[in-house]
Every structure is written in C-alpha cells, then in structure tokens.
Image (spheres, grey):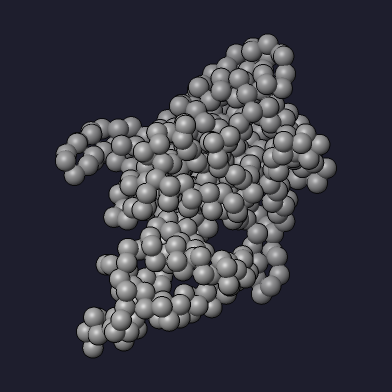
Amino acid sequence: MRSDDNQELFFGAKTEEKGFAEVLEEVRSHVTREESVLLTDKADAELLKRNVRQYLLDHGLSARGYSADELVSAIYEEMAGYSILTKYVMAEGVEEVNVNSWKDVQVQYADGREVKVPERFESPEHAVNVLRRMLHASGNVLDSASPVVLGHLGKNVRIAVMKAPVVDEEVGVAASIRIVNPQNLTKEDFLRSGTATEGMLDFLAALIRHGVSVCVAGATSSGKTTLTGWLLTTIPNEKRVFTIENGSRELALVREKDGHVLNNVVHTLTRPSENPSMNVSQEDLLDVALRFDPEIICVGEMRSSEAYAAQEAARTGHTVISTVHSNSCEATYGRIVTLCKRASDMGDETLMKMVTEAFPVIVFTKKLDDKKRKVMEILECEVTPEGKRNFRSLYRYEIKEVTRTDEGCRITGEFVKGEAPSEGLCKRLLSNGMPKAELERIGGRV
C-alpha cells in the first residue's frame, strides 16, 4: 500500500492540514487540560502516543510534510522528550551536542567526527523552551534573571546553556550538552584509535596500582576523563577506590557478576547549593573520603581549592588520580599551584614543592586538528634531595607532517620513548610492592 494511502486511512477523508506548530499547540493544549497525568516523569510513553494518535484521528488533523507516524513521533518528542535533540542525546557514540543557535546544531561523535545535523528548531523561542525543559530535570531555571545556567540530565549528561541577553535575541539560545559514553573503553580501544602505545598504557596502569599519584591534563574534550576511567578499571578488586565527581557521574567502576559486586568502590557526587549549610563541595568529599580508608582516591577534576586537599591526600600515603585543564605537562604544575592558592596563602615555591611531590607524573592529552585524541606526553618531575626539580620526558608523541585539504586534516606522527623513570621513582615503586621483573618490563631501572 502506498504511503499516501496509509495517510488517508489514518487521518480520514476530511483531514485538516495545518502547520506542525499549530497542530502541536492544539494537541498540547488538549493533553495538558484533559490528560496531564500523561506528561509526568513516570508516564507511559506508548499511552501518550496512543492518546496523541487518537486525538489527531478524532479531529481530522494532519501537518504539512509529515506522515501519520512521523507526526505522532514528532509531537511526542516535543511534549515528553527534547524535540530534535532527543535522538542525538540518547544515541550511542555521541559525545557532545552543540546548539550554536536555533537553526544551527552540531554533533560530535566519539570517533572525532563533527557533523551539522539537518534538523533545526521551529524558532528561537522553541529552542529556548526545549533547553528549559532539559534543565528542569536538574531543578534549574533559565530566564532573564538567570541567562547562564549549568545543569545535568541524568547521571552522565552535562548541560551548559546561555540565552538573551548573553546571546542575541535572533540566536535564541546557545548550549553545550556533553554526554559521557557509558561504555568503558579497553586497552585495545586505545591502541586501535592510536591514542597511546601499549607501553605507555602499561606504565600508567602500573603507577596507579603501585601507589604513585598521577594527574591527567589537557583541554576540554581532549580525552582526560576517558583515560582516567580506563586507568581506574585496571585497579585490582581488593583495592578500595573512592571517586569524587562534580555534579554528574562520568565514571562507572562497580563490577558485578551473577548479582554480586566484585570490587570495592564508593562513587560520590557534589551537591551545589546557594545555602552554604547544604552545599557539598569536592573539598568536603575529600575530607569524607579520608574517613573511608581508601587506597585510591579519584578527584574527577581539580577546578578550585579542592586541589590543595587533593595534593595533601597524595602526600600522606594515598594514591590520587585527578584531571585538570592545562596546555602542557610542565604548565600543569603551575596550574595546580594557582588552584591551591585559593585555599592557602603559602608562597608559590612552597606550593610548587608540595605539588611536585604529590603528583610526580603528569599525563598530557590533546585532541589534534584531525579530531583524533593523543597522549602527547608523559612527564616525570624528579625532585632531588637538594630540592631541585628535573623534568624527565618519559614518552611523547612527535608530529611529522600535517596535510590540510577541503575534506579535512591529516596528521602523521609517532610515539617516542624518552628517558627512563628516575631512580627515586623506581625505588618508590619497588617499596610499594612492584616486582623487579615488572619494573624492568615498564622501562624502569634498579
């Protein structure tokens, strides 16, 4: 049967064809007035769709450019979902959805592709209303008094939204929706994508397992959290891991088999509040973490004064892994010092001594112009008995050639093994239980 025959059977012979926005408003008004229970969080999706379908049929409504099924689905997404954003926010392999304006939406995939989507909102007002609905899930309000809002959608979606007067009225809204892939990547995934070599990954995993704190640095979307998440999956089940994340969960480390939890993990989240007595910060959770007898503490990202508490924990026998925004390995130490100064009035040199002792190894990640993520360098900061700091580049990625065409950018390069770990770091690994054979395997010397 032809699609137009289906259309006629569904809508009936006296179908009144209108624009989508007009049909949507009529159906929304009916459901809000007569069937508001269908719009609650626990409502049955299929029941709402059936109700919409029946209303269209009873009133002979259709929309220009939509088949019967397309119209029902589109109305449902507007009323209970997130309009054109729904299928991208929920799609596998999507890492980020960027709304540059009501008619310009771009999707970034895990493989580095960035694609302009064919869909667009109906108007600037429509875009604002959809983003308001998304922010409502985390109790946030987007209006003229609060034109810049940070929120989350579920455990693994972060949302940052701006509206007029911060952006132009004709733009409507600008938003960044970051989706954390719930699938934990394997070592083979990193090797296949060319993010790092097996030797680099084995070296970093060995550090964490044997008590050496590591900071993973880089820009937004450079792969910091992805690499950190994988490193934490290499932790033996018997070691106690305490994670601290800001606002939304990006780590999923609990392992189960036959309904039983195999490992020893406590996941925690901050709780921002305008009421100081109700606010739970990363710094607060770090203080709590020390009471849970953790062997490894993960601070999802050092953004402020929690950096001071993190380095204190790392210098008092705990293994700490964290991330920070920075533009190189060496610059990372200065960045952490700057964050520590928000909690302490110590001098820069004193804080630098503390920070380099706390995080002897820095990993720098970057998303290159070809959209591929690389571990650009693994750096050790060796602190000599005299207090001198020696930077040792243990591994690095060297770019050999960059070719740019209308189709995009192609980068060729290679990973280079640099200096061996310092004698002090090797002794520390051995004293923390690393077998001599494993130390030699990762390039250490005795």
The one nearer the camera, 12 or 370, is: 12
Residue 411, how many percent across, how many down?
26, 38
Residue 96, how many percent across, how many down?
43, 48
Left or right, residue 50 beside residue 344: left
Q: Is residue 44 above or below residue 114?
A: below
Outermost residue, left direction? 406
Residue 178, how many percent across, how many down?
48, 47
The one nearer the camera, 66 or 403, is: 66
Quick one: quadrant of the C terminus? top right
Left or right, residue 105 beside residue 137: left
The residue that appears at 42% across and 61% down in the rendered structure is 87
The residue that appears at 52% across and 31% down in the rendered structure is 325
The residue that appears at 51% across and 59% down in the rendered structure is 183
The residue that appears at 68% across and 14% down in the rendered structure is 350
Left or right, residue 234 beside residue 392: right
Quick one: quadrant of the N terminus? bottom left
The one nearer the camera, 103 or 5, is: 5
Quarter holding residue 61: bottom left
